[in-house]
Image (cartoon, helix red, strand yellow):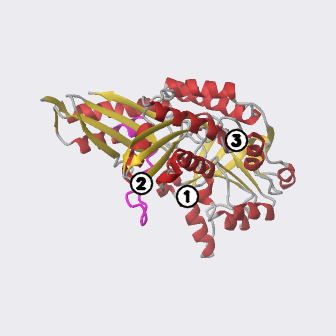
Amino acid sequence: MREIDSSQISAALSELIVKTSTSLGDDILTALHKAYEAEVSPAGRDILLSLLENACIAGEKKIPLCQDTGTAIVFAEAGQDVHINGNLVDAINLGVRQGYEQAYLRKSIVSQPFSERVNTQDNTPAVIHTEIVPGDRLKLSFMAKGSGAENMSRLFMLKPGVGHEGVIEAVLETVENAGGSPCPPIIIGLGVGATAEKAMFMAKKALLRPLGVSSPEAEVAALEAEVLKRVNGLGIGPLGLGGRVTALGVMAEAAPTHIASLPVAVNLQCHSARHGEVVL
Amino acid sequence: MISGIKLNSPFNPAELEKLQAGDRVLISGVIYAARDAAHKRLVEALNQGKPLPFDLKGQTVYYMGPSPAKPGEVIGSAGPTTSSRMDRYTPELLDAGLLAIIGKGNRSAEVSRAIVGKKAVYFISIGGAGALLSQRIKESRMVAYPELGAEAILALKVEDFPAIVAIDSQGNNAFTLGQSIYRTAKEA
C-alpha cells in the first residue's frame, strides 16, 4: 500500500491549474498552425493568427488564455494499492481554490443552479470523476471547461438501426446548431455506446487525449477521421464566419451497449483546450 | 486581426449604417461590459420604470466578464461571451437606445429584426482571445452592480479593439453569408 498525503494532491493540482490557464499544449498549438495553413477564408486566417498571437501574449504575460477559466473538472484515477491520507474531495477542492486564486482566474461557479445564483467565490466545488484502476499511483487530469463550448453538449439515444451514418449525423447536427458559439475551431469529444451517463462521460474523457492521436481501435479511429472530414465540410469555420476549418480534431470512445440502445454523446471543446495531467 | 475600418464608440449612426456584414473593424472609445446577471437587472429596472445606472442611448455593450486583473494591469483576460444567452433581453435594450453590441456567436431571428428596426449593428470579437483583447483595453471603471463580481457593469476605454460586423443594420448576416461560401455537401 503506497501512501499519498492529501497536501500533495492539492499542491500538484493547483500547479497544474496555474500552468494550463496560460499555456496551450503543444498538440493544440501545432493544430492551430496547421489550421492556419489549411484555412482559405481571409477572415478565418486572421482569426487563427490572432489565436496564435493570443497564446503568445498569455504565455509571456502570464494572463489567462481566455477569461472563462471554466468549471474545474478533475478526473482522479486512483490505483487500488494507494492509500490517501486525508479527504480526496477536500484535497481537490483546496487545489482548485489555491490554483484559481494564485493565477488570477475567474471564479465562475454559482452554488444554486436555478434559484439564487450566488457565486461561491473560489470556483469550487470541482466536478470530480474518480475511477479505481490497477497500480499504486494516483493520476489527476484537470480540464478547465468553458461554458460556451459545454453548453453545446448533446446526448442522442438513437435507434440502433441508424448505425454508423446515424452517429455521424448526430455529430453534424450538434456542430451545426452550435455554429460560432463554442468558439470554433472546436475539438469534438464523442462517446458512443454504454448508457446515457456513461456515453457523456466517455465524450468528456476523450477530450483529454492529445490532439492528433487516434483511437487505438481501428473502427473507432476510422469514425473519428470520417466525422472530422464531414464536420469540416459544414463550412462553419473559425468563429462561425465561414471556412474550411471548423474542427481541429475528433476524439471518440466506444463501449458495449444494450441490444436496444445506441447512445451518442457529443461534448464540444473550444480551441482554448486547457487540460493537463500529473501522476503522483 | 491585423487591419480593419477604424471607428469610434459611441458610434456615429450614419457611419454605423454604412457597415456591411463581414466588415472587419477596429473600435476605439468607450464600450460597456455587461453580461447575463447585469442584463437581467437592466431589464428589470426598465420594466419597473427605474433609472438605468448609465444612459444606454447610442452606446455599445460588450458581452464580457473578465478574469481578475493582476497587480499593475488594467483588466484580466477579456474576451466575448456567447451572445445568444442575452437574446431574451436585447430587444428591450435596443428599444431603450442601445446602438451596438459586441459578443460571439449568432443571434435569434427576433434580435436580428430588432437590430434592423433600430439600425443598430451586432459585432463579434475573437472568442477565446481574451489575453490578446485585454491588451486593447486601456482603462476600466466600475459603473454598476459591483456585487456581481465578474458580471458587474464596467466602462472600458478601448483602442483598436478588433471586431467583425456579424449582423449589419440591414439584417445581413456574416455567419450565413460566410458559411454558404465554404459549405461542401453535407453527405459523404
Type of amino acid at the residue the image marks with label 2:
Ser
Q: Nearer the viewer, residue A232 or B46?
A: A232
Mark 3, residue position: A235
On what subunit does the disc labeled 2 rest? A
- Relative placement, left or right, of B120 versus A160 is right
Percent x, y for residue B30?
Answer: 70, 48
Residue at horizontal 78 percent and vertical 41 percent from the top: B181
Location of residue A66 by image quarter: top right
Q: Are marks 2 and 3 on the same chain?
A: yes
Q: Nearer the viewer, residue A215 or A144?
A: A215
How far is disc 2 from disc 1 in space, using C-alphas?
38 Å
**Label 3 Cα neighbours within 10 Å, binned few <14 / some 14-19 / many ≥20:** many
Type of amino acid at the residue the image marks with label 3:
Gly
Mark 2, residue position: A261
Relative to A189, residue A262 above or below: below
Mark 1, residue position: B36
Mark yes or no: residue A138 visible: yes
Extent of the magenta region: A98-119
On what subunit does the disc labeled 3 rest? A
- Relative placement, left or right, of A35 versus B23 is left
**Label 1 Cα neighbours within 10 Å, binned few <14 / some 14-19 / many ≥20:** some
Q: Are marks 3 and 1 on the same chain?
A: no
Residue at horizontal 80 percent and vertical 48 percent from the top: B21
Q: Secondary structure at mark 2?
A: loop
